[in-house]
Image: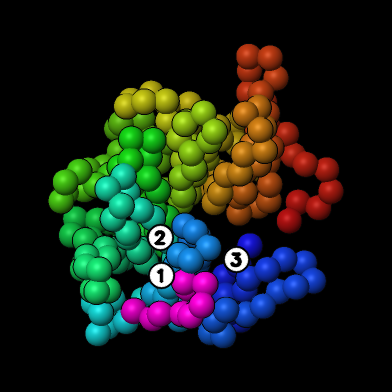
Amino acid sequence: VYVATPAGLMAGGPGHWRRIWPGASLAVKVFSEDEVWFGCGREICRWDGQAVRRYGAAQGVPADEWSSFARDQRGRLYGRAAGTLVELATEQGRWARRDRGLGRATEGGTLFVDPAGRLMAATDDGLAMLAGKEWRYIRRRNGLPTNVVSSMYEDREGNVWVATNGGGLARWQGYGEWEAWTEAEGLVSEMVWSILEESSARYWIGTVDGISILELAGNEWKIRQPKGPAH
């Protein structure tokens, strides 16, 4: 297990943690035991199981708070900050900007690869999808509850869930086909940050005001609040 913390990148588990990187780490993405990418201060770093390699301005990485990493169906690696996207363009470790036409993201800009292998990004102007060298957007006019997207999640059945800032939670069932949940359906808040799948019939929804649980009861989805403290 790897955990990014303000005190560094930690690896291990209860009772046997070790520090991989001593500086502030904002996010971590584990592809394998010898390929772990994380934001290290205002640079991008890779842990290969033996040592940490840093990528900064000399390698084409602008100084920023790197909050998300993803690899598309062609094996291309991307790193994202709130207003910046870079691609690892060469085997020698040179990065290139790929954010022309990509909107900013208040919450840092989660990256996501959909079931078809396409790179998608959360922005304040909709759900952005990379098509060739251009970004296309899914917005309210396409059925999204609001344009401000916080994060995305793919469940075990390949459904794409979208957390929004102010529009609640949405499940993308295909172009133009959405199912959504808001405070009217029982969400504790419509400012949703994250989604975690416990099973195909139960999801934990993280919001600014606490947690809601989305459960399938028969053929209908129901929302309830967990017992205990809300935060």
- Find residue 214 and report its horizontal and vertical position in percent: 65, 33
Instruction: Pick the residue in front: 186 or 41.
Output: 41
Question: What is the magenta range?
Answer: 47-55
Q: Which residue is mark 1?
A: 66
Q: Which callout, 1 or 2, points to the residue nearer the camera?
A: 2
Q: Which residue is mark 3?
A: 2
Which residue is at a point 56% across and 85% down the rendered structure image? 22
Q: Is residue 39 above or below residue 198?
A: below
Q: Is residue 186 visible?
A: no
- Find residue 72 and report its horizontal and vertical position in percent: 32, 49
Q: Would you call the spot at circle 2 few (<14 residues within 10 Å), some (14-19), or many (20 or more)?
A: many
Q: Is residue 141 above or below residue 31?
A: above
Task: State the separation of the CA atoms marked 3 and 1.
Answer: 16 Å
- Residue 49 is a magenta residue: yes
As helix, strand or loop, the secondary structure at mark 3 comes to strand
In screen coordinates, is 178 left or right of 62?
Answer: right
As helix, strand or loop, the secondary structure at mark 2 comes to strand
Q: What number is the disc on residue 12?
A: none
